[in-house]
Each structure stands twice: as C-alpha cells, then as structure tokens.
Image (cartoon, helix red, strand yellow):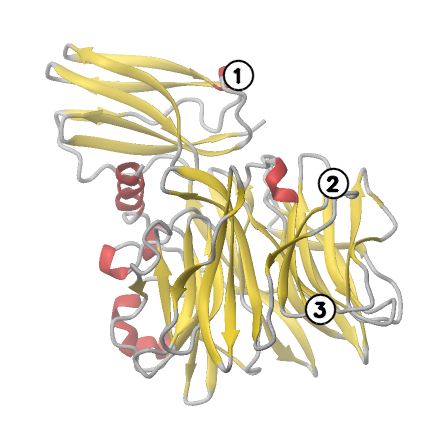
C-alpha cells in the first residue's frame, strides 16, 4: 500500500496551487464560532454547522453549501433556547444527518444530538445525560465513504474517554481511557486506521499525569480494545488529531511549538516534523485527505492543508501552500487574525466541474462581532500530468469521468511487459485488479464496473505498473 500512496503523492505534487479571495461565511449580529461540516455527498454539496453566541446563550445553526454556486446558506437553528449549546459535530449518511453537540440545558453539560432527514428535524436525544459533565464530543474522521463505524462518537467525562455508537441507542457507552486519582485524559480523536495490516477504530488522547503530558492511543481488535500505546512523552505535547491513518500532534521539543506526524502507528515513535528548525510556533495542523507526508518526504502540497502560526504574540493562519519551504518569508503568505483563539477547520465541501472544493475556515472579528471566514482551494479530480513517466509507458484518463456505474480505462504498452492495473480507494486500499498478465505492445482498454464491487460514491485511484515503471490517475464515482 505504501507504493501506491507514494505514487499518488508524487503525481499530486505537480498540481498547481490556486489563489482565491477570502470569503465571509457568516454575517450575523452575534458571535459565530466552531465551524464544522459533514462529508461532501457524491452530488457535490455538503451540510455544515456552527455556533452563534448572544450573552450566555448559544445556538447551533445548520447550513448547506452549494458547490455549483459556491454559496453558503443557513437552513435553520438546531437549538432554539436560552441555554449554551457548543462544540457541534456532524455525521452524514446517504439520507440522514446526525447533529451532535454539547448542551447545559439540563443544568450541567450533556452530549445531545438531533436527526435531520427529509428536511425535518427530530427532537433532541442524549448520548450521555447524567449529573456529571460530559464534554467535548468528537466523531470519527471520515470522507465521502460512509460505513456503520462513522456513527462512533467519543467524549470526556471525569477525565476519562468514552465511546458511544449512536446507531445503537440501547447499548451503553464504553470507557476506553480510564482516569485515576492523578491521571486524566482529554483532547481525544478517533478514526478508522490500519495498523500492522489490521483495520479498526483507533482513539488517541492527551494523557496528563502529575503535570506531565503524553500522547497515547488504543486500537480496537477482534478481542476488544488493546493496551495503551505511547506515541510521545517528551516535551509539552497536546492536540492529537487523526488525519485518517496518520496522527498529528503539537510538541515544543525544540523550544518552539511544532507539528509532528506519525504516519504509521505500527511504529508509534517514528515521527516527522513540519518545520526542521522552527523559529516561531506552529500548531493545529488540518487536512481532509488520507495520508500525511511531511516536507522531508516532499509531500505537503499533495492535498490542501492549513495550520496556525504564532509570531510575536500575533496569530496567523496558513493559507498559501506554495512557500512552506521558505518559512522565513512567511509575512506575505499567512493570514493575520485579530483574535488569538481563532478556531481552525479545513474540509472538503463538494465537487464541481471536475474539481474537489476545499475550504479553510477560521474566526475573526469584524464590525464588533466574531464571524467565520473561509478561503477556497480547488483540487482537480480529472487528468494528472504524467511528467515523470517514460514515453514508452502510458495510462490514459478514464472515460467518462465522473462516471456511474462504469468507466473505461486505456493503457499504452510499447514493449512486451508484465503489467498490473489495479483500483484503490481513497485510503489506499486495493479494491480490485483489472489486469495482471503479460501483454504485447499495443493499446488496451479495460472496463471498470463498480456494480461488481458495491462501491460508494467518492474518489478512486487506478494504477498501472510494469516493471519499475508505474503511473497513477484519479477518477470520481458519482451515484
């Protein structure tokens, strides 16, 4: 799987970066915070949510992004009361949206959710409702592909981390990380991760013991949840966050806060850094794709990403991806924010005209209120320039693209070769092999019928290999 990932990243590094204007997403007479979105649907659009605050009360708002018009529209309030409702999270299925949030409506913090389907909003249900505070809900990091595991919600209670599957309302939450007298867990993140060829849920958290912090994780196996594994226990570490199979976190081992990546949890102590010798603080890395590869592996440009920078007590948002190698000239490539606790978010919002549309979101003050701002980045999902592939070997773009349910892939072979043509999903998993045989010189076409494999909408990759040569292209299945 590592070979396909490396090829995808190398090809994607040839993609150009686009410059787009900053857009004000919200314009309300109140403070707007904590933007999140649900997975973009195969039809190109997505739901989003955010908080709006007036005094001591806050409302969860639901909105809809239209990719064709590049427009954001608030649909309705999810909560409409005088209580505090914060930390929204969204889980989407093909026809249902779960809106999860933290509320103090019952006198202390509880985790609640509403179901939105057929333009109707259900009453509030409770994931956790006790006399003890339940806080900081988080959901499994997910993309277009929807599986039952995406119903997983984690939250904190008394310094422990609990897991709840909201598709099983009668099943009690499971305590994954248990707090002790001087030990607590926080800042948890959950994803569906491959470790040593085994796939399953993995939860990472910040562990605090007597003032010392570490990053740990547990993985779900056939026999239940495994033992706690330490990722980092030196320096001041915080904010573990899954980027699909990779785990990012912040650390200050070099005197300044920097972003660290563990790309393979089978080797939890093998990390890479965003910046080799940070001169300012870098933290809170955000992306919305499968793998994280750092600058030492020449990779960060392969999919949109953002992070925050603190310099001379001023906060900046990384928006320009072209000049990361030259971070000493960051003054013209970062967006200054007036507020120092701006929340950062990056998400795939939809598809339009052969492009995946990503937005980076943050908060800033304007006209006396805090509003949400965003900047768009396009990622082409059509042809990729095969600059590095020898002239004796070629793979054409599939047609049609996007497609449903089938498409045709053409290859060009000019010498007798053993060739393999395989399909991979967005996580780098092999879906099927269309060709794996010796071929004489010529042009060959192969039909890829997704109905045979019951595949959901989303981005897929197809890779042609012959000896030491290989080429990868992307295609989009829209159901």
Q: Does residue 147 appear to the left or right of 442 in the view shown?
A: right
* Nearer-N-terminus badge (1/2): 2
Per the image, the residue denoted by label 2 is: 168
Residue under the point 60% across and 68% down: 179
Q: Which numbered disc, 3 or 1, marks the residue closer to the eye? A: 1
Res. 29 visible in picture? no
Residue under the point 35% across and 53% down: 263
Residue farthest along the front direction in this orientation: 181
At mark 3, the secondary structure is: loop
**Position of residue 240 measured from the top left corner of the image (x, y, whole percent):** 48, 64
Residue farthest along the left direction in this orientation: 415
Q: Does residue 148 appear to the left or right of 103 in the view shown?
A: left
In this orientation, which residue lies closer to the viewer: 301 or 239? 239
**Position of residue 40 measured from the top left corner of the image (x, y, whole percent):** 59, 43
Q: Which numbered disc, 1 or 2, marks the residue closer to the eye? A: 2
**Position of residue 460 measured from the top left corner of the image (x, y, whole percent):** 43, 32
**Structural distance between the alpha carbons of marks 3 and 2:** 38 Å
* Nearer-N-terminus badge (3/1): 3
Which of the image's four quarters has the C terminus? top right
Vertical relation: 126 (above or below) 239? above
Q: Which numbered disc, 3 or 2, marks the residue closer to the eye? A: 2
**Structural distance between the alpha carbons of marks 1 and 2:** 29 Å
Dot 1 crowding, Cα within 10 Å, few <14, some 14–19, many 20+: few
**Structural distance between the alpha carbons of marks 3 and 1:** 44 Å
* Nearer-N-terminus badge (3/2): 3
Per the image, the residue denoted by label 1 is: 451
Per the image, the residue denoted by label 3 is: 27
């Amino acid at each position: 799987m590592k070979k396909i990932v490396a090829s995808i990243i190398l090809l994607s590094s040839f993609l150009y970066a686009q410059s787009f204007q900053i857009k004000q997403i919200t314009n309300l007479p109140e403070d707007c915070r904590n933007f999140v979105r649900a997975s973009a649907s195969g039809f190109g659009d997505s739901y989003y949510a955010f908080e709006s605050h007036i005094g001591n009360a806050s409302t969860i708002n639901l909105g809809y992004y239209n990719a064709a018009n590049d427009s954001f529209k608030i649909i309705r309030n999810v909560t409409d009361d005088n209580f505090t409702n914060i930390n929204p999270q969204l889980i989407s299925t093909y026809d249902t949206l779960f809106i999860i949030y933290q509320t103090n409506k019952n006198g202390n913090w509880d985790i609640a959710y509403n179901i939105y389907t057929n333009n109707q909003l259900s009453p509030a249900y409770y994931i956790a409702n006790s006399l003890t505070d339940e806080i900081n809900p988080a959901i499994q990091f997910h993309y277009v592909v929807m599986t039952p595991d995406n119903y997983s919600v984690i939250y904190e209670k008394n310094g422990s981390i609990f897991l709840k599957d909201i598709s099983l309302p009668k099943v009690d939450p499971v305590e994954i990380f248990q707090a002790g007298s001087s030990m607590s867990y926080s800042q948890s993140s959950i994803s569906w991760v491959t470790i040593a060829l085994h796939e399953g849920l993995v939860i990472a958290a910040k562990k605090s013991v007597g003032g010392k912090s570490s990053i740990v994780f547990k993985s779900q196996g056939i026999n239940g949840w495994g033992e706690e594994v330490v990722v980092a226990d030196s320096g001041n570490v915080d904010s573990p966050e899954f980027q699909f199979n990779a785990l990012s976190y912040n650390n200050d081992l070099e005197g300044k806060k920097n972003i660290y990546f563990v790309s393979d949890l089978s080797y939890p102590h093998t990390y890479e850094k965003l910046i080799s010798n940070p001169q300012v603080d870098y933290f809170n890395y955000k992306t919305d794709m499968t793998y994280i590869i750092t600058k030492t592996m020449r990779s960060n440009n392969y999919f949109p990403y953002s992070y925050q920078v603190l310099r001379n007590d001023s906060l900046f948002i990384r928006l320009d991806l072209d000049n990361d190698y030259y971070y000493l000239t960051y003054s013209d490539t970062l967006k200054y924010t007036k507020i120092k606790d701006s929340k950062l978010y990056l998400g795939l919002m939809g598809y339009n005209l052969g492009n995946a549309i990503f937005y980076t979101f943050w908060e800033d003050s304007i006209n006396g209120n805090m509003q949400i701002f965003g900047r768009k980045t396009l990622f082409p999902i059509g042809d990729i320039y095969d600059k590095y592939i020898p002239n004796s070997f070629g793979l054409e773009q599939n047609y049609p693209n996007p497609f449903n349910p089938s498409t045709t892939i053409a290859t060009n072979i000019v010498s007798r070769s053993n060739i393999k043509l395989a399909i991979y999903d967005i996580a780098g998993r092999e879906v099927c092999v269309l060709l794996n045989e010796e071929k004489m010189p010529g042009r060959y076409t192969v039909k890829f019928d997704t109905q045979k494999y019951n595949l959901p909408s989303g981005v897929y990759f197809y890779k042609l290999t012959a000896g030491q040569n290989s080429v990868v292209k992307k295609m989009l299945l829209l159901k």
